[in-house]
């Protein structure tokens, strides 16, 4: 689930659950990085960008609902 098109097809409730899941994974990866066991450092950036994309879609939906 990395493309914005795929994210837009998911409901807000499911997106919020996905954000929580990604934040947990990000926490685990940061811990692995701190102890020197992180195998794929690019995954950190990928997760951060995915979280930002999800938050962007949620904000867009909230703004369009206000109009």
Image (spheres, grey):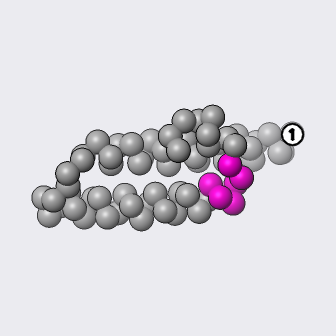
**Residue indicated by mark 1:** 67
Is residue 40 inside the magenta stretch? no
In the rendered view, tell whether residue 50 sits above or below residue 15: above
Measured from the top left, where is residue 3 in percent x and y?
54, 36
Q: Main secondary structure of the magenta part?
A: helix
Q: Which is nearer the eye, 24 or 9?
A: 9
The residue segment tinted magenta is 10-15
Measured from the top left, where is residue 31 in percent x and y?
25, 64
Residue 15 visible in the current orientation? yes
Residue at 54 percent of width and 41 percent of height:
53
Question: Under tag 1, what secondary structure?
Answer: loop
In the rendered view, tell whether residue 55 sits above or below residue 14: above
Residue at 41 percent of width and 48 percent of height:
47
Q: Which is nearer the eye, 66 or 22?
A: 22
Measured from the top left, where is residue 32 in percent x and y?
22, 62
In the rendered view, tell whether residue 30 sits above or below residue 43: below
Find residue 63 and report its image quarter. Answer: top right
Q: With 63 as the anchor, is 15 left or right in this view?
A: left
Residue at 69 percent of width and 43 percent of height:
9
Q: Quadrant of the C terminus?
A: top right
The total number of labels drawn is 1
Task: Give the crowd class for mark 1: few <14, some 14-19, many >=20 residues within 10 Å.
Answer: few
Residue placed furthest toward the left: 36
Q: With 48 as the anchor, is 13 left or right in this view?
A: right
Residue at 59 percent of width and 36 percent of height:
4
Residue 52 visible in the current orientation? no
Q: With 10 as the anchor, is 2 left or right in this view?
A: left
């Amino acid at each position: 689930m990395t493309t914005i098109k795929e994210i837009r097809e998911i409901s807000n409730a499911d997106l919020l659950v996905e954000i929580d899941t990604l934040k947990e994974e990000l926490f685990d990866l940061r811990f692995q990085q701190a102890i020197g066991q992180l195998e794929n450092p690019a995954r950190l950036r990928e997760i951060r960008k995915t979280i930002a994309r999800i938050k962007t879609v949620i904000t867009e939906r909230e703004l369009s609902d206000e109009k």
